[in-house]
Amino acid sequence: MRMKDKLFARLKMRKLYTQLVCAFFLVFFVIITVSAIILYNNIIVILMDNSNTHTEQQIRQYSHNIESFCRQIDLVSRQLITNTNIQDFAVYEEMTERERILISQEVIRSFARTVKNYEFITSVIYYGNDGLFLKADAKENLAKFDSNNTGAWLYTSDIFREINYNQSKLTVFGGFSNDDFTTSGEFPVSGHDPGYCISAARNVFAGSASGVLIINIDLEHFISIYSGTASDKTGVMYITDNRGKIISHIDAAEIGGLSQAFTLADSYSDIEISTLGISGEMTQVVANRLEHDLVLISEVPVSVIMRDVSRLRNILLITLVIAFAAAAVTGTYFVGRIIRPVEKLTDAMKKVEMGDLGMTLDSKPGNELGVLITQFNEMSQSIQGLMIKNEAIHEEKRKIEMEALQAQINPHFLYNTINIIKWMAVAIKAENISDCLTALGDLLNPIFKSRDILCTVGEEVTYTKQYIKIMNYRFAGFYDVNISVPEELMDCMTLRFILQPLVENAIQHGDMDSGNGHIDITVDELGDSIKLTVTDNGKGLEAEKIKEINQSLESGIDTGEQSESRIGLTNVSRRIKLHFGDEYGLTARSRKGEGTSVSVTIPKVPKPQ
């Protein structure tokens, strides 16, 4: 059975160990996980903000580059208009054939010089409203006049209407190649090998005649203006016109298509940033409306921005795994340090329960458990001390009971002898001797008639009266005794023969004046206790002497003169303490010349019914 209990206690301790480890790990897990999630989310926000800020800065810089470049093209177009003979086209129809050829050649040479001077200009073209068509590029120079040929596709396009709408303002558009600018009335077919370029056009006013000047710009050069990272696969930057048509893109296949992100920039003049779903993928879009009705758009997939976050997430996961492993090891170690002393303490308590009193633990950790083990050691030693003391008390009671049994023999013999003497006194008619012997017999009768160590206060008072009666026969009525006991205390229980020794002590050692001896016997109620007091009017004792008597009564030890002069008091005190406890006993008070008072305090115990 003991082995089973010990095993059960071990299992319970292991359960506590597991609970503590799990609690420690759970708290650590929650704290670290929540911290990691907050850190991860904040890093994502920071990365997105940094990406937005970086892209916005790029957009602003590239927008500035594009607008500066467009102003340069605008300047070139103005120079071509003012520094050539285009103004002579106002009277083109009135010229002779030779004059037309000369003016056209002069204008084409001017166009050719411009193409040669500016490497990024691929061609310069003039469409006259009167049917004149001039073109200069790196391959050829072309001049054509046909007053009936006004069916070129440009005249029927939205671009032409926009050029006219802008009047003298430069119009930038795209999605066409150099070869698309002809006198053909057919709109250029998309999908062929384009060799796309960016076109800048403006109206040319020459008297009553008018036309359109177009400067075609190399697309790669134009892309390099706003995309220094054209080969970067992390995102894409491109330009649309005011209808969302893509006119400049690193991927030629995208040119001419509509931008899904264009609506973000629609009707806005400043940079706009948003996250849109494009082609099934969340994309960070930054758009800015430029001069000349252009829109610069940057598209960066969120997955690209989050690429570094993925690496960070992996690092965090690895860190969390390492942290959790470290927490498990650390938690197991520290919980073990807590549980091991508890296990030792539990084993020690089991041993104390099995009777191994007084055992102590040597190992004391420097924490609250150390205090607990110290208290256990003190408790174990205190229990052992109490057991030893209890055994001594029981041994003392046993000795007293043996002495009482042994003493019963003498009073029994004495009682029979007293009866014989009493009848002899009756026979000779010595009444005073007979009464005295009768009182002595009544005094001794309880010793052999009852083995109970307790009696009522009333019975104890009766025994004391018999003793006083005998003493007054002896001393011829020398002592005046006053007894005051409340009726309700008469049935309270007390030890036998504790009042008579006090009266005897007062008579023997009170040193009262001849013919004036007075003894007061009182019984008072003090809460849960009662106090029996015997007071004489003797000469009293010195303070030093009464202090010595009280110390002897407290310790219950008779020594020297104390044992001889105060016979019975120490015995009564020991009996009370053994039976009722150390908080009860005798107390003596005295002043020189004012008499002596001895009090007995016992618990208030009612008489059994």
Image (tube, helix red, strand yellow):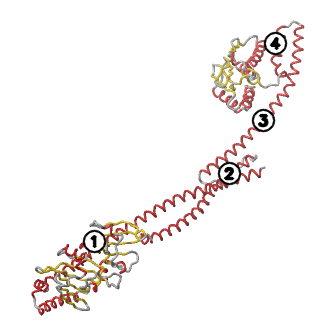
The kind of secondary structure element at disc 2 is helix
- 555 displayed left or right of 38: right
Provide residue 71's location: percent of width, then percent of height: 21, 77
Instruction: Give me the C-alpha separation between circle 1 and circle 3.
Output: 114 Å
Q: Earlier in the sequence, mark 1 or mark 3?
A: 1
Which quadrant, please, contains the C terminus?
A: top right
Q: Is disc 3 surrounded by few (<14), some (14 to 19) or many (20+) residues within 10 Å?
A: few
Instruction: Give me the C-alpha separation between circle 2 and circle 4.
Output: 69 Å
Whether label 1 touches label 2, CB < 8 Å: no
Q: Which residue is mark 3?
A: 394
Q: Is residue 426 shown above or below 30? A: above
> What residue lies at 75% left-to-right and 19% top-to-bottom?
460
The residue lying toward the viewer, choosing from 116 and 339, is 116
**Residue type marked 4:** Cys
Instruction: Give me the C-alpha separation between circle 1 and circle 2.
Output: 86 Å
The kind of secondary structure element at disc 1 is loop
Q: Is residue 469 shown above or below 577? A: above
The residue lying toward the viewer, choosing from 383 and 558, is 383
Q: Which residue is mark 2?
A: 345
**Residue type marked 2:** Leu
Whether label 2 touches label 4, CB < 8 Å: no
Q: Earlier in the sequence, mark 1 or mark 2?
A: 1
Q: Which residue is mark 4?
A: 436
Q: Which residue is mark 1?
A: 242
